[in-house]
Amino acid sequence: MSTALLIDFGGVLTTSVHEAFRAFAREISDDESLVLRLLATDAESNALLVGNENGSLTDEEFEAGFAARLAAHGVTVAPEGLLARMQAGFGPDPEMVDGLAALRAHGVPVALVTNQFGRDCYRGFDLPALADEVVVSTELGVRKPSRKIYAVACERLGVEPSQAVMVDDIQHNLDGAAKLGIAGVLHTSAADTLAELDTRFGLR
């Protein structure tokens, strides 16, 4: 039975980040997959994402660079405020936030393990109130799926990786955690995730 929980932020405690990016792509183009596709498969765009999430690129550097990549694909967007526009379509998932609080009330120690995308991506959230520990990519200089970020989370909670379970909406982040022996739960809905966690922590 697991004894500690590591949990992602965007797309798990919030509504879908992918849906937000698709909404932004529809706003600026006729291709709703444009933003996700560039971030995933365009080497320069992906390097900008990685750099912003590990803290080596400022928000302004990301915005200027990604606006240039969009322009290279025929879409003209002002760089100023680009991150805010990309993230405008997502907000908290109350069911997950409440479910996380219930798990903590039952004594489950929780670490939030998150890749920070833009300095304002947590606006409106009190991260220290959500979890016992908050492990942010920009503070460590590495991002998921690096094993270091999961190891730090376990260390701060005082548990062995084999005692922890990680919840994320992206499989390769779970694959990174699995290299340390951390069990994974792929988040697809609040109901399914919370039911699975109740089982894993012996609450049902």
Image (cartoon, rainbow, N blue to C red):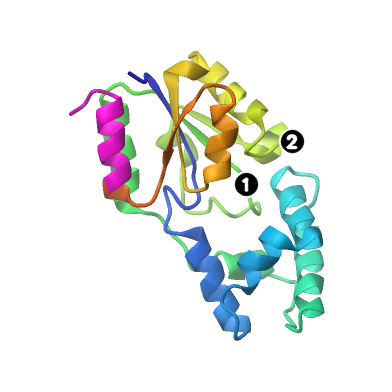
Q: Position of residue 148 (x, y in %)?
A: 66, 26
* Disc on res. 22: none
From this view, report whether residue 193 is shown above or below residue 106: below
Q: Position of residue 74 (x, y in %)?
A: 76, 84
Q: Which residues are magenta?
A: 192-204
**Residue that label 1 marks:** 116
Q: Nearer the viewer, residue 172 or 148?
A: 172
Q: Amino acid at mark 2?
A: Gly
**Does the stretch in magenta take in 203?**
yes
Classified by dominant secondary structure, the portion drawn in magenta counts as helix
**Residue that label 2 marks:** 141
Q: Nearer the viewer, residue 186 or 65?
A: 186
Crowding around mark 1 (Cα neighbors within 10 Å: few <14, some 14 to 19, many 20+) is many
Q: Position of residue 138 (x, y in %)?
A: 69, 40
Q: Nearer the viewer, residue 87 or 154?
A: 154
Decide if residue 95 is on the left or right side of residue 165: left
Q: Check disc 1 and report its element: helix, strand or loop.
A: loop
| Residue 109 seen | yes
Which residue is depicted at the point 65% across and 38% down?
137
Q: Check disc 2 and report its element: helix, strand or loop.
A: loop
Q: Marks 1 and 2, how far apart in space? A: 11 Å
From this view, report whether residue 49 is shown above or below residue 19: above
State the quadrant of the N terminus: top left
| Residue 88 seen | no
Which residue is depicted at the point 60% across and 55% down?
120
Looking at the image, tell me whether mark 1 or mark 2 is earlier in sequence order: 1
Q: Amino acid at mark 1?
A: Gln
